[in-house]
Image: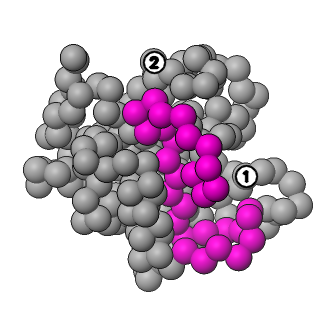
């Protein structure tokens, strides 16, 4: 089986997982790139093996319209993780724990947020149960997910649609997404890394 090594963590290709990060509100003095980098560090502290990190991408609030009018833009990124001993439910629990650490309050579906963490794909698994749908049911419609995912895995195939991230992104209309900065992270072996 093929293995890949980026950011100091080796993993089997079949065990790749992708997690989306998004934020448009500050938390305890952190905002923007610094907040995303802190969130990535918190994921590592929760035992999530970070293998690679996309750049930060700016996007307008989603979905466009009255529900998000007046909200600040989001910064988004995608991280590649190694599943290791985690199953999808255990990974979700860790993501929710990190969201809570960053003051996430779930008041309204499209409300602004300090941090939003979503499993985009868990090693190609397809799951449909309350609280967890894999792959993420709307990832293929969102440039703010697909653009950073394409930095890491342009040939990733959507488990239900069978299309690559690159093809899905190319089909979308312009959603105003732009790359803004590289992100630094400390990988599981303690090495500092930066995606350029």
Residue for badge 2: 155
Colour setup of the view: one colour
Query: Where does residue 7 sit, x and y in percent of width and height?
Result: 20, 40
- Evaluate whether residue 56 shows in this view: no
Image-quadrant location for residue 151: top left
Check if residue 108 falls in the magenta segment.
yes
Secondary structure mostly seen in the magenta stretch: loop
> Which residue range is magenta in the image?
104-132
Q: Is residue 15 above or below residue 30?
A: above
- State the residue lying farthest toward the front: 129
Query: Where does residue 109 sit, x and y in percent of width and height?
Result: 74, 64
Q: Work out which quarter of the rendered image holds the N terminus and state it.
A: top left
Give the alpha-carbon distance from disc 2 to disc 1, as whole Å.
Answer: 25 Å
Q: Is residue 175 left or right of residue 46?
A: right
Q: Residue at x 43, y 63 (%)?
A: 93
Q: Is residue 76 left or right of residue 28?
A: right
Q: Secondary structure at mark 1?
A: loop
Q: Secondary structure at mark 2?
A: loop
Residue for badge 1: 62
Circle on res. 28: none
Query: Where does residue 89 sit, x and y in percent of width and height?
Result: 44, 55
Q: Residue at x 25, y 65 (%)?
A: 45
Who comes first in sequence, dot 2 or dot 1?
1
Q: Residue at x 40, y 33 (%)?
A: 123
- State the residue lying farthest toward the bottom: 28
Check if residue 172 falls in the magenta segment.
no
Q: Is residue 31 above or below residue 181?
A: below
Question: Do the residues under discs 2 and 1 have CB atoms within 8 angstroms?
Answer: no
How packed mark 2 is, by other alpha carbons closer than 10 Å (few <14, some 14-19, many 20 or more), is some
Q: Is residue 10 left or right of residue 18?
A: left
Front residue of 84/81: it is 84
Q: Is residue 168 left or right of residue 126?
A: right
């Amino acid at each position: 089986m093929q293995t890949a090594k980026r950011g100091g963590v080796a993993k089997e290709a079949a065990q790749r997982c992708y997690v989306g990060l998004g934020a448009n509100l500050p938390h305890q003095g952190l905002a923007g790139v610094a907040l995303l980098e802190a969130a990535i560090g918190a994921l590592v502290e929760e035992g999530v093996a970070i293998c690679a990190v996309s750049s930060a991408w700016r996007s307008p609030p989603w979905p466009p319209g009255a529900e998000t009018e007046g909200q600040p833009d989001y910064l988004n990124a995608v991280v590649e993780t190694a599943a290791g001993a985690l199953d999808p439910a255990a990974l979700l629990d860790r993501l929710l724990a990190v969201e809570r650490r960053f003051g996430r309050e779930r008041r309204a579906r499209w409300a602004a947020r300090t941090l939003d963490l979503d499993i985009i794909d868990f090693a190609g698994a397809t799951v449909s149960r309350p609280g967890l749908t894999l792959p993420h049911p709307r990832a293929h419609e969102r440039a703010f997910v697909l653009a950073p995912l394409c930095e890491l895995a342009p040939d990733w195939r959507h488990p239900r649609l069978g299309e690559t991230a690159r093809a899905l992104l190319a089909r979308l209309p312009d959603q105003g997404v732009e790359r803004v900065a590289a992100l630094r992270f400390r990988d599981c072996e303690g090495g500092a890394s930066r995606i350029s």
